[in-house]
Image (cartoon, coloured by chain):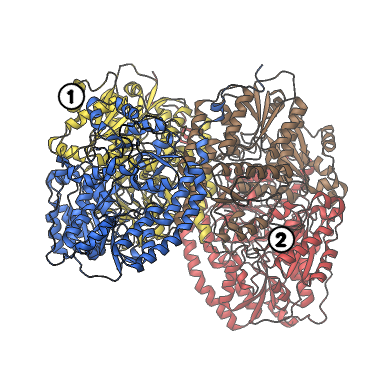
Chain colours: A yellow, B brown, C red, D blue
Amino acid sequence: MLLRHTTTEIKERKALTVNPAKTCQPIGAMYASLGIHGCLPHSHGSQGCYAYHRSALTRHYKEPVLAATSAFTEGASVFGGQANLLQAIDNMFTVYNPDVIAVHTTCLSETIGDDIPQIVNKARAEGKVPEGKYVIHTNTPSYVGSHVDGFANMTRSMVDYFSESTGHKEKTINLIPGYVEPCDMEEIRRIAGELGIRTIMFPDTSKVLNGPMTGKYRMYPEGGVTTDALKKTGDSMGTVAMGALASGPAARALDAKCKVPCEIIDLPIGLHATDMLIDTLRQVAGVNVPESLTFERGQMVDIISDMHQYFYGKRVGLVGDPDQVLALTKFLVSLDMCPAYIITGTPAGKKYEKALREVTKDVPGEVKIKVPGDMLLFHQWIKQEPVDLLIGNTYVKYIARDEDIPFIRHGFPILDRVGHSYFPTVGYRGGMRLLEKILDALLDRKDRDSTDIEFELVM
Amino acid sequence: MLLRHTTTEIKERKALTVNPAKTCQPIGAMYASLGIHGCLPHSHGSQGCYAYHRSALTRHYKEPVLAATSAFTEGASVFGGQANLLQAIDNMFTVYNPDVIAVHTTCLSETIGDDIPQIVNKARAEGKVPEGKYVIHTNTPSYVGSHVDGFANMTRSMVDYFSESTGHKEKTINLIPGYVEPCDMEEIRRIAGELGIRTIMFPDTSKVLNGPMTGKYRMYPEGGVTTDALKKTGDSMGTVAMGALASGPAARALDAKCKVPCEIIDLPIGLHATDMLIDTLRQVAGVNVPESLTFERGQMVDIISDMHQYFYGKRVGLVGDPDQVLALTKFLVSLDMCPAYIITGTPAGKKYEKALREVTKDVPGEVKIKVPGDMLLFHQWIKQEPVDLLIGNTYVKYIARDEDIPFIRHGFPILDRVGHSYFPTVGYRGGMRLLEKILDALLDRKDRDSTDIEFELVM
Amino acid sequence: MAKAAENSEEKFELDGMDPEKIKEELLAKYPTKVARKRAKQIIVNKVGADEEVPVIQSNVRTVPGLISQRGCCYAGCKGVVLGPTRDIVNITHGPIGCGFYSWLTRRNQTDPDTTPDGHNFMPYCFSTDMQDQQIIFGGEKKLKQAIQEAYDNFHPKAIAVFSTCPVGLIGDDVHTVCRQMKEALGINVFGFSCEGYKGVSQSAGHHIANNQIFKHVVGLDNTVGDGEYRINLLGEYNIGGDAFEIDRIFEKCGITVVSTFSGNSSIDKFANSHTADLNLIMCHRSINYVAEMMETKYGVPWIKINFIGAEATAKSLRKIARYFGEQKLTDRVEAVIAEELPAVQAASAEVRPRTEGKRAMLFVGGSRAHHYQELFNELGMETLSAGYEFAHRDDYEGRKVLPTIKVDADSRNIEELEIHPDPERYNPRKSEEDLEELRASGMEFSGYEGMMPTMKNGSLVIDDISQYETETIIETFKPDIFCAGIKEKYIVQKHGIPMKQLHSYDYGGPYAGFKGAINFYKEIDRMVNSKVWGYLKAPWQVNPELAATYAWE
Amino acid sequence: MAKAAENSEEKFELDGMDPEKIKEELLAKYPTKVARKRAKQIIVNKVGADEEVPVIQSNVRTVPGLISQRGCCYAGCKGVVLGPTRDIVNITHGPIGCGFYSWLTRRNQTDPDTTPDGHNFMPYCFSTDMQDQQIIFGGEKKLKQAIQEAYDNFHPKAIAVFSTCPVGLIGDDVHTVCRQMKEALGINVFGFSCEGYKGVSQSAGHHIANNQIFKHVVGLDNTVGDGEYRINLLGEYNIGGDAFEIDRIFEKCGITVVSTFSGNSSIDKFANSHTADLNLIMCHRSINYVAEMMETKYGVPWIKINFIGAEATAKSLRKIARYFGEQKLTDRVEAVIAEELPAVQAASAEVRPRTEGKRAMLFVGGSRAHHYQELFNELGMETLSAGYEFAHRDDYEGRKVLPTIKVDADSRNIEELEIHPDPERYNPRKSEEDLEELRASGMEFSGYEGMMPTMKNGSLVIDDISQYETETIIETFKPDIFCAGIKEKYIVQKHGIPMKQLHSYDYGGPYAGFKGAINFYKEIDRMVNSKVWGYLKAPWQVNPELAATYAWE
């Protein structure tokens, strides 16, 4: 047993988090920053933070993840990080020549109370910010929220720093894809493209964190939303924001700042959430849905109907980020599966928890939900009554192995497989991939557990 | 043990095939026929044949597979099937109104020696073939070759019956995709589309055998090559035929009949075979390769380089259809994997076998190849010395379970999983899918077989 | 279960429609000759006095080009009847396809560890993989060699050879080859002339299989085994473990199964089957020949039973107890029924509010289209239309019509064994008086009422239904569930209607016996109430008007 | 391994280039201040008389914005040193991130079943998940409660608390909390003031970890265990099972490992470690403090050994045997070496034709950048450039420079324990005469030659290499392999150059000892000869002209 000290008995814990289902804000901000073309994320704190964030993102994407740090030492911690940040800005522009430096704070600089805009202004005054270059920032205190909030905050800062309203509306829709994989962003753009809609997506990590091997390294890969595009978001007709937690703040900020109305919908994971994305886009943009998308939809429904017997009634344990967990829960319920244990580590709030309970209200049997919860509790629930399938990040494989339960990797981080950054799980195609993954997991287990007598050729 | 009577000791067999790695010609012809829009395949033989073929194709695709039969009884077997076929043609056009009836023969009608063109002429003369409708045929004696030959023969008959040369060349390239999945055909077309090439693909089962669930049944789905397009193949600039066994005969027939030059290349499975497809298309059409395809290529190379350590030196047992087996073998070798046992049931000939030996000549250790061979022999080789991975159709899972070897489903038939008809394995994207599948299989096993001490978080 | 006869002049209604009119519509598109033929196979049911029903033409040739569900003689012989016997090496003599397609594609479960030698060749496909040389020069030599190789590699106790279409045409004498190899190897080797073109459907293959098993196997072992109430279960193929569930119930009741034809079977049990005291027939169509011949030669009576449906199971058990006529057995059977039924009733009560009033259609096989109506009845579901794929008139109308069935050319080609009482082993199990008494008490021997007398008036009974007819009745009635086979599965479902396979059970089951009934209830509840059928339309199809919220200026 | 000193005026070549010029290029782009600083950290190696090497500035602050490989103090303390100890519940006191990122991300293998209680908390991540309330009102209460909950849920024998950045700023007194909880719970509870901003790299964390382990654990158990040649192995973290391989060799040699700091370790073994007779140091940087303190307090001498490389392993074993000075041990060690080496040599002979002459670069850690040059040497590969991530001058230049190292402000903040000989337990393991004799025979105690004296003249030695410098030397030299950590992995590989992680071993290993050497040879052969590096260009990039075979008219 790997997690040999996890007991079936649950003792209430108020102070100790064990096996967290979240991490801290800055990494989310770093990930979002990488979705701006030519951007160098910067961690204003101790160098441990950026080292950890770069490592974690690198392990997940198996791609270069560049970022810089203010490299606080004790002195900076006492006297503030202004000198470090000024020096860092100078060095970054001189040595690495980014278009944008995106600064996020850490628990350290937040506790100190460094005023980033003031420091950046000083840097600009001192000529450390070259003409046409940008330094943006967001506040990401590690002791508030989770990596999802960090992503949301940096995404909102893109609006705060760039979005402009010229008064002339463009036939463009802003897409805020949420804290999803690069390929998911690509797929969302493709779907909008099929609808014939011109879009600006931000952030956009596609081609950045799933890039090619060519023998030539590009510090600033092809992908990412450009600053020009970000500016134009203020002139778009509307914004479709996916995932209330990760994308909501930016969408609302854009509405407030530039009067761009927004629709905040679920992440388009699963049939109905994808329906919602497409129907929203269609209505917002006033376009017709092309046959190509309806066809993909039909393929997905076809798989569901063909394989329904294998989904039906299967109990699932689900842990991940709140936007994903909500969309996945709805998806599983739509398959007549039974999400039994649902945890997100992010303190997503009462309203969020209520939404989860609403979605699962007709699921047979008790549905246990904890927001925020940790993976120890999740594991203890499983020990009390097992499930048929686990969905979560790589850490869940320790539970899956101990309890011998089929397991699908989804979410962040996935450290031990490839595919998640190349093959989307959003949209109908992504939904078909998820269906395949669920079926593979369940049917592989059925094959394994069948006696010789029961072993099936056809399924 | 499921295959409890399979011995490690190998006794030579000359007359008895056990656990075949092929099936008979007519099913291949039926599959190819379904790649013509509005076509109703027709099996000229006993009704058992079409029942079996429809069942097998249905189980593999989980989609409707419509076809008709001459329903021979003893009388027809003695006196010939002319009356049956005449009646069938009349009934089919009257009741099911296809654009095309594609007749293939069976061992029964071949042994009798029914002359299909003569019977069809009679039907036409008797007014049983409505204006603008077609009856085409191919000869598919079940006791010659395999289902692959049946596919090749029906594909060649499309040329024989339809291709016309008007003398005016069109800027069009014919694509003969080979005996691959509907989604593979779609992907090959997409690749050609990215290159900006106008193409005619035949046969084309995409949208036919991976169609949507809409609540409305269409006997003749949207997909398939139209008879108009088939006619125009004779005016194309060239033909790129994928898979020498399945597509070669049609390509050569088209060259002979309409002087359309052809390139016969491997199925585009794997990096280099996809390179070859694209480079061939580029050269044949005189176009530039767009960045989008080079980018996908780079992503695939990236996965290979990132995960090379897990591929390196792994011994693979591979069984399938000859065009697939050859392309897969090359692909595995390119990953520094070691195809150790290679079998196809199709009697693909000495030249084919030589090609396999050439591809594997630098593979470390002995490489056992049998063309044609059966799965009993394949299993016996494995019993003598196991491999790290098995690739083959669903029947291989009996071996995989008995010998406890990781297994990837590829080829025909796949009866117990979904995905093969929706997610291509051709092209770079397909290659990435294969890489993911191989890695999942190998890494799942590594996770399973690791001791608690060795169990890895990151891979 | 027979419905009371009603006024014969009455016009019947079916789901609010006129079934006669629908029949007309079904035929309207056909060429005249075809329409004329199909008209005799599409019957509006009408149950008269004495359960008299209209004549339905069946076991006749499939119309070429019409697309039916049927398979061939080989499929019925090798696939259905002999397929489930685990310890025979079944060699298909012919091109590779026939062997390939019948390789593990029927879900006959088998438990080799209940046979002393543990033989199980069912996961294997053996074929002579006939090539053109054999077509030209004959295949006997290769067949002989293949039998030898099968023996050398696998050392089975028996080898069977199945002929495919070309074998008959090229004139290979498989029976002589088998006889020679039987002598050479010293094991049982026998052949089947089950070429695909024989007869008009799988049914011919069943008959041929029955004949050869009876000729070459039954009676080889006269050992009378232990057990008090010794029966054979005939026509039960252990799809999805049905026979296991029935065995479980029999064991609980103290009834001893000598042999099952042919689910979970072993050739040794066939050899010994004539020592049983009663034959029970599940699938009348596929196996009644064996029962008939066993009765004639050995004196074993047969009765029709049915273990599909909880009520039917209880009824069948009581029938068996009645046959043996011992209070001990009767008591035990009643105890078992009392013990098993509550769980079944609880399960049906749970799902019935969701299944009640739903409408089914069944087109499958030679018995399931009838038997499964029992289960649907238990769910409160009505069967609007049903038909067999390969049955004969007796399966529809009841065995009472047997004397009136004309043997046509296609059937005449199938050998009819001439059986006489065995001079030594014929042994009537009951005295004529006992039988008379049993008959008087309502026990029917060698009888089968058929499907039609149990169906409602106005139901559409369709023999050898075509693809066109299938689609038309689906479009017309929009049934809540449709039952057939794999070929029909996705066609039906594309209409947005759940489709239950009753050959393979969609890889579920068992559905026989008490536990099987519970499984079936749950499965049908899942299917007819699945959310997925509500997903067929996208929101923009339901509500297609453009509402450009932020419409372009 | 030291290279002979060469004419000091000589201009060195590096891979056919002038290393001084390359150094200039590396600095050219930097702002003046940065260039001035980095110039002291980028050194062209030159080994003089007495293995004298140039001064290299190290253990100094990272330049903000320059992008280095370094992590923080917490990482060095919690992640590196204490991470591998299985039976302590390690609670991170701070926001969730620090605990999350250090959760199972180092590959320290551990075998809990070798500890009587089987405790293993390494797969768990424990955190106080500090929230803004704690930042505002202080986190001591929550920490106390968390320790209590850890005890209630897991009943460990020890709990350790690791402070993250905000803890120091808000003034939580973790040591007092720990003391209180130690009393309350009756188990060992101790804390580390290893806030991320302390020091200039992980190195500060190592020091803090060493101090606290020495203060709170070492010496708690005076039981002298069995075994003849009792040693501690220090600075071996059992990445990929290295320590298991070393243990295997020790066991074969009859050498008893009292404790490993801290691969596969248990707190009980630390408590007892002062009873060993010799300390062996693998990673000098991370652990020399413990060795120093143990020598001062308990009289245990230490020697530097290295089990990376087959030759180094043999040499280290002989050194240990020499220390104990018994023929029996010497014979056994020689026998083991004789037994193990042939397989290693065979493996190197097999791959060497494919690795000979290839060029490597190593930028990692505080010892591996040195040790792994041994293995590359054994493959016939040259190390063009190397450097440490967080080492000090002694690790580069050798401990002989220790007296000349100025303690700067960042280091002065790290507590330096004042250690005195234990009044009761101080026990010099060798007499002064014995030591003298050993020294005379060439045995060096408390010594480490450093990396630079073992490298070729002209090699580039780069401390705390930046991303920019990394890219530049890669572009300049196109090495055949580059070794560093996960953050550098894919950057390097995008250049088309294979990159070997020497922190995590890319999830391979072990690479220590004899079997480890074989693993490494094979791995490097695989990497530098992988076909994939030939796939970087598409055919149309190699040969881009358009050749329209069937060109449009």
Check the image and report above or below for C60 versus B118: below
Q: Secondary structure at mark 2?
A: helix
Work out whether residue C307 or residue A280 is closer to the camera in this orientation and state it: A280
Rendered image quadrant of residue C265: bottom right
- Identified by mark 2, the residue type is Asp
Work out whether residue D521 or residue D103 is closer to the camera in this orientation and state it: D521
Q: Where does residue C65 sit, x and y in percent of width and height? A: 75, 43
Which mark, residue A122?
A: 1
Residue that badge 2 annotates: C395
Residue at 83 percent across and 75 percent down: it is C420
Q: Quadrant of the N terminus of chain B?
A: bottom right
Using the rendered image of the protein, determine whether residue C40 is visible from the camera's viewpoint.
Answer: yes
Q: Secondary structure at mark 1?
A: helix
- Identified by mark 1, the residue type is Lys
Q: Chain of mark 2?
A: C
Residue C103 appears left or right of C292: left
Q: Chain of mark 1?
A: A
